[in-house]
């Protein structure tokens, strides 16, 4: 009877009905408390629901019953990584690989853990192995692309995102990430093309609107930049960076009152945001409000020890005759 519940739980999970799947795995475990696969797949369902505490408990239960379940080690490594316990994640992946050297997911998870620790050379070897074992999985190329990007190797990263997109062309995040890399290379036309596609696939992606706004701004298309920042704010009104960047575009357009209003909002959201104080000071200075500008530049000096920012603030104060 426990096996019947287990099989139906697997079917529910395949249909993305994870609450029903968990309920059936519970029934299976009630009827057979030592049935390790039911614990394993219940843990997987909890991962997808984002309940990592219950996932950890269920996966550890599976492994205590059957330490030969390579897949359970892989799943638990993901939970450890989500908790920031990267060394434990790596150990679980190593145990999984010792049990199943053809498990591409184990290499992928270990590579991601190494990357999170900044050990990109080790991460790259694992991503290469994951691709060798399963070249059709977009996630392997995506993660290797992330590692290349972290190493500043943007061309290789873009090539990996090309491969990922070829395998998963409906994934908006892949276009968004590639767009970010094009923007870092100052190729804003291509960046905007990728952001366009990302937004077409996911119109509610506030960050994609924000980044497209950045590229429009750097291209000098201030009207479109402001429109995108406005949409990003509609979707996520608590992101101080969007207000700050829109303020900078208003400032470039000479619309200082609008710029100051945006910097005000950014500072309200992040009261120790040095850049917002400095930029508001610039806007006040250009608007002719020298006293308020000086106050903002002094605030920058009070908030930061960064020598570059301090020098900028000191020079701005000197220009005001302060």
Image: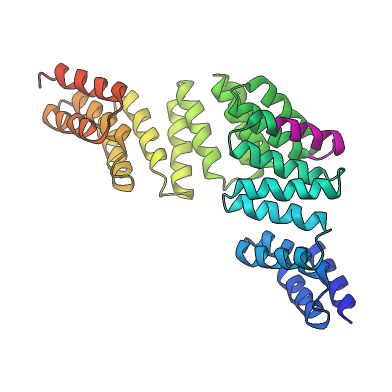
Name the residue located 10 percent from the left edge and 22 percent from the top edge: 322
Q: Is residue 20 left or right of residue 274?
A: right
Camera sees residue 62 = yes
Q: Is residue 67 left or right of residue 234?
A: right
Looking at the image, what colour scheme do you see?
rainbow
Work out whether residue 186 or residue 43 is closer to the camera in this orientation and state it.
Answer: 43
The location of residue 270, given as percent across then percent down, is: 33, 45
Picture quadrant where residue 293 is located: top left
Picture quadrant where residue 203 is located: top right
Picture quadrant where residue 241 is located: top left
Q: Is residue 294 left or right of residue 87?
A: left
Magenta segment, which residues? Answer: 123-137
- Please tell me whether residue 312 is drawn above or below residue 123 in the rendered image: above
The location of residue 89, given as percent across then percent down, is: 66, 49
Name the residue located 74 percent from the left edge and 76 percent from the top edge: 23
Work out whether residue 144 or residue 158 is closer to the camera in this orientation and state it.
Answer: 144
Q: Main secondary structure of the magenta part?
A: helix
């Amino acid at each position: 009877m426990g096996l019947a519940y287990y099989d139906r739980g697997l079917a529910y999970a395949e249909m993305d009905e994870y609450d029903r799947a968990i309920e059936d795995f519970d029934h299976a475990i009630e009827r057979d408390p030592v049935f390790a696969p039911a614990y394993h797949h219940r843990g997987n369902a909890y991962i997808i629901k984002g309940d990592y505490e219950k996932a950890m408990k269920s996966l550890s239960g599976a492994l205590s019953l059957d330490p030969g379940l390579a897949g359970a080690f892989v799943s638990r490594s993901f939970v450890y990584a989500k908790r920031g316990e990267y060394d434990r994640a790596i150990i679980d992946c190593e145990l999984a690989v010792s049990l199943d050297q053809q498990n591409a997911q184990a290499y992928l998870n270990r590579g991601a853990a190494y990357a999170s620790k900044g050990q990109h050379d080790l991460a790259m070897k694992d991503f290469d192995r994951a691709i060798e074992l399963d070249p059709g999985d977009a996630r392997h190329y995506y993660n290797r692309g992330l590692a290349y990007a972290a190493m500043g190797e943007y061309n290789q990263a873009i090539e990996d995102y090309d491969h990922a997109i070829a395998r998963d062309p409906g994934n908006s995040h892949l276009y968004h990430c590639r767009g970010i890399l094009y923007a870092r290379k100052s190729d804003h036309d291509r960046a905007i093309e990728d952001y366009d596609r990302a937004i077409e696939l996911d119109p509610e992606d506030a960050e994609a609107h924000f980044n497209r706004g950045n590229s429009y701004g750097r291209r000098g298309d201030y009207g479109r930049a402001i429109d995108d920042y406005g949409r990003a704010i509609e979707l996520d009104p608590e992101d101080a960076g969007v207000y700050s960047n829109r303020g900078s575009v208003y400032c470039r357009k000479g619309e200082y009152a609008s710029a100051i209003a945006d910097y005000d909002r950014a500072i309200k959201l992040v009261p120790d945001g040095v850049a917002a104080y400095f930029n508001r000071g610039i806007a006040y200075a250009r608007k002719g409000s020298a006293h308020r500008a000086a106050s903002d530049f002094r605030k920058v000096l009070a908030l930061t020890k960064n020598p570059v920012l301090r020098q900028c603030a000191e020079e701005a104060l000197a220009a005001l005759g302060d």
